[in-house]
Amino acid sequence: TERSLILVKPDGYRRGLTGEVLRRIEAKGYTLAALAVTTPTREQLAAHYAEHEGKPFYEPLVEFMSSGPVTAVVIEGEECIKGFRSLAGATDPTAAAPGSIRGDLGRDWGEAVQQNVVHGSDSPESAAREIGIWFPGLSS
Ligand code: ATP
C-alpha cells in the first residue's frame, strides 16, 4: 500500500479543524501511520517547499507555515496520494469544489498565501521525501 504525508496547516489547526480532517481521512478508509503536532522550523519548511523557492509566494508561505502548530500525518492506503488530493480539492479554496476539504472548510482570507487548510504529497517521490522531513525516525 501507498503512504502520503498530510499537513493540517496553521489555519486549520487554529480553527480547530484537525479532527474534521482526520475524520474525513478515516471515513475514506485510509489509516493513520503516524501523527504529530509541531510548530515547523524554517529549515523544515525550506526542505518541504524547496520546489517553490524564489516564487513570489514563497516567503509569505514560509512565514504563514511557521506561524503556529501544524498536525503532520502519515496516511496509508491504496492510491492514497491521489485519493487525498481529491479529498483536499483545488489549491484555491474559493475555487475548490464543495464536498472537498478546501471547498467545504477553506476560504480566501485575503492574504498573500492561499490558506487552504491542508497539504498532501503529490507523488510517491514527494511522499517519501516529505515523510523523511516530518518523521525522520519512521521506517518506510
Ligand atoms: P499543497 O502542496 O499544499 O497540497 P498544492 O499542491 O495544491 O498544495 P502547491 O502548488 O504545491 O499547491 O503550492 C504549495 C502551497 O503554496 C499551496 O498550498 C498554497 O498554500 C501556496 N500557494 C501556491 N500557489 C500560490 C499562489 N499562486 N498564491 C498564493 N499562494 C500559493
Image (cartoon, rainbow, N blue to C red):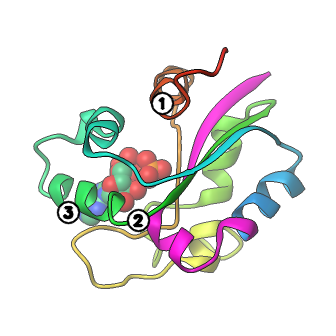
Horizontal side of residue 125 vs 61, given as left or right: right
Span highlighted in magenta in the image: 1-19
The answer as to whether callout 3 falls within 8 Å of ligand 1 is yes
- Give the label on residue 130, or none: 1
Q: Who is closer to the viewer here, 8 or 79?
A: 8
SS for dot 1? helix
The answer to which quarter of the image holds residue 75 is top right
> Residue 83: within the magenta?
no
Which residue: 40% across, 70% down? 115
Name which residue type carries label 3. Answer: Pro
**Few, some or many C-alpha atoms within 10 Å of disc 2 (few <14, some 14-19, many ≥20)?**
some
- Give the label on residue 68, or none: 2
The answer as to whether callout 1 falls within 8 Å of ligand 1 is no
Which residue: 40% across, 65% down? 68
Q: Quadrant of the C terminus?
A: top right
- Give the label on residue 60, or none: 3
Residue at the far top: name it: 139
The x and y percentages for residue 86 are 65, 52
